[in-house]
Structure formats: C-alpha cells, structure tokens
Amino acid sequence: MPTSQDILNDLRGMATPEHLAKMAHFGINTGRALGVTVKDLRAYAKGMAKDNVLAGELWQTGVHEARLLACLVAEPKKLERGLMDDWATDMDSWDICDICCMNLFRRHPEAYEIAVEWSRRPEEFVRRAGLVLMTTLAVHDKKAPDYHFIRLLPHITAQAADERGYVKKAVSWALRQIGKRNLALNAAAIHAAEELKTLDSPSARWIASDVLRELRSEKIARRLAR
C-alpha cells in the first residue's frame, strides 16, 4: 500500500500547468492545487483499496488533489461523523465539496440527517455540502420513498435568502433534482419554488425562476410522463 507521501509524489508527476489554469478558470481554489484532472484521479484511485486511515492522511496534507483522492478512497460506512464534520469545515472549493458529497458522504448511513444539519451551518461550503448532499441523494437514492424528499424541502427553501453564490446555486440544484424524480415530487418542488417568488429576496426570486424554468419545461414533462 503506498504511503501518503508516495501518492503526493505521484500526483505531482501527473500535474500540468495547463490543467491548473483551467481549474482557476472554473472558479476552483488553486491555492494548494497541483493541476491534476479528476479523470486521472479516478483512474489512479481504481487501483487502491478503501482505507480510511490513508484517506485521513491525504486530507491532512491540505493538497487539493490529495483531498479529492481522499474522497475516492475512503470507506463511507466506516467514516466517523466527527471526521466528516472536520472535512466539511475544511472545505474551501466547490469541487471538493461536490465530489465528497457525490462519491462519499451520500453513502453514509446517516446521510439524510447530516445533510439537514450541515444545511443549517453558517459556513458557505458546509451549507453547500448539506444542500449538495440532498441533491445527490435525490439523484442516486432511487428506492427512497417520496416523504424523504418532502421532508427535505423546508430545509432547502430555508436557505434561499442566502445571497452567496455557491449556496443559492445549490438550493436551486437541490430543488430541481428532487422535482425531477417523479410527478408528485415535481409538483411539490414547483410549489416550493412558487413560494420563494413571494419573498423579498433577490436570491430567493432567482432560485424560483431557475427552478420553475426547468421543472415546467416540456423536456421534464415528457420524461416524467413515461
């Protein structure tokens, strides 16, 4: 099993200045980044066994790509809540937030409870993590009953007045993904968005417009009618 230092050396060899510039272009915090593509990180992680100790060591390096890799090699069902909270608090870029939620945190047994808890936290990326966790559960938890997502709607809309870009976009994303699960949840998400239109908040009104545009589109209507 390679050590965290071995892995850092490998990552440095995989990095390119061109990709580092591309990361910056897409709003990724490159202060401690090397310039390795996510595609290359996923390919590298395929040859590694799940190991939470190693994942923790990679995260502690603070190197951007090492933290992304930590999300790919950790074992979600054995991940301690305290460690998850620490990682969420450490997040400083939208891509780390989203990849952690999509690849790791959504598989934790307490994912729904964690999502609600984090959505109430004041830190921008912790709050985003809670909302993105709800989003990715809506996409991937195919067998979950509707009431799981009905119960999430008030927690999502509660953050709609947050003007921070990464939060308001996550609120929209969560509502739209819930509304694309089935006809009943589509109606519930549209109702939630209609209520946001009445708020005296530019962010809430932007979210409402973004959500209603997609959830009322012919494309979504055709898909849900199948």
Image (cartoon, rainbow, N blue to C red):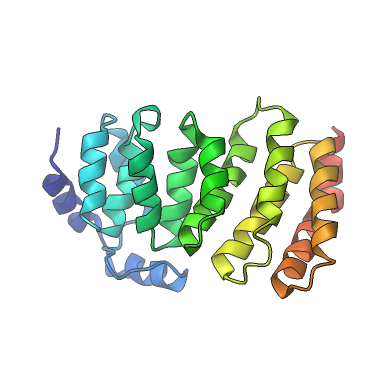
Q: Quadrant of residue 71?
A: top left
Q: Quadrant of residue 201?
A: bottom right
Q: Nearer the viewer, residue 209 or 149?
A: 149
Q: Residue at x 52, y 56 (%)?
A: 127
Residue 222 drawn at (x, y percent)? 86, 42
Residue 120 against residue 54 in the figure, above or below? below
Q: Nearer the viewer, residue 165 or 103?
A: 165
Q: Residue at x 34, y 49 (%)?
A: 86
Residue 172 drawn at (x, y percent)? 68, 57
Q: Nearer the viewer, residue 18 or 59?
A: 59
**Please, which residue is most extreme toward the top here?**
143
Residue 108 against residue 35 in the figure, above or below? above
Q: As drawn, is 4 to the left or to the right of 117? A: left
Q: Residue at x 51, y 62 (%)?
A: 122
Pick the quarter of the image with the N terminus: top left
Q: How many marks?
A: 0
Q: Nearer the viewer, residue 119 or 22?
A: 119
Residue 208 drawn at (x, y percent)? 78, 62
Residue 144 against residue 168 in the figure, above or below? above
Pick the quarter of the image with the C terminus: top right
Residue 109 against residue 185 in the figure, above or below? above
Residue 176 drawn at (x, y percent)? 72, 50
Q: As drawn, is 24 to the left or to the right of 181? A: left
Q: Residue at x 22, y 52 (%)?
A: 60
